[in-house]
Amino acid sequence: MINGIVEIDLHGMNTYKAKTLIDSQLRRVNGSVYYIRLIHGFHGGTELKLMIQDAYGNGKHPKVKRVKNGNNPGITDLILREL
């Protein structure tokens, strides 16, 4: 963890493994974490990005306030609390 940011590298994972890892991190985070940065890449397709938006966007998870696309198309942030 770096300054309230947890980074998770999802390269090479299928959607099931990625969701399992993300869910376990969400269970473990405490109040000092502002967001979780998910590094999924984009050259191999958009399955992981779509799964993240579908599973955690629009209030579907109690700890996730919103889902934000990163400046890089291979990164998605789960915002847990505002700075």
Image (tube, rainbow, N blue to C red):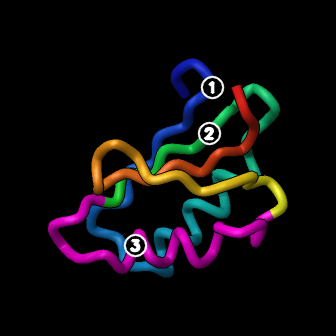
Q: Which mark is residue 4?
A: 1
- Look at the image and say whether residue 77 sits in the magenta stretch: no
Q: Residue at x 58, y 70 (%)?
A: 20
- Residues under labels 2 and 3: Cα distance? 18 Å
Quadrant housing residue 62: bottom right
* Residue 30 locus on image (x, y percent): 79, 35
Residue 5 vs 17, above or below: the answer is: above
Disc 1 marks a residue whose amino acid type is Gly
Q: Which mark is residue 82?
A: none
Contact between labelled residues 3 and 1, with CB atoms less than 8 Å apart: no
Disc 3 marks a residue whose amino acid type is Leu
Label 1 element class: loop
Q: Is residue 65 left or right of residue 36?
A: right
Label 3 element class: helix
* Residue 80 locus on image (x, y percent): 72, 44
Give the mark nearer the N terminus: 1 vs 3: 1
Q: What stretch of residues is rendered in magenta?
A: 41-61
Please state which of residues 72 and 4 is positioned toward the viewer in this rendering: 72
Contact between labelled residues 1 and 2, with CB atoms less than 8 Å apart: yes
Q: Quadrant of the C terminus?
A: top right
Q: Residues within 10 Å of mark 1 (few under 14, many from 20)?
A: some
Q: Residue at x 75, y 52 (%)?
A: 65
Residue 30 vs 72, above or below: the answer is: above
Disc 2 marks a residue whose amino acid type is Tyr
Q: Pick out the residue farthest to the left.
A: 43
Q: Which residue is mark 3?
A: 48
Q: Which residue is mark 2?
A: 35
Q: Residues within 10 Å of mark 2 (few under 14, many from 20)?
A: many
* Residue 18 locus on image (x, y percent): 47, 69
Quadrant housing residue 29: top right
Q: Residues within 10 Å of mark 3 (few under 14, many from 20)?
A: many
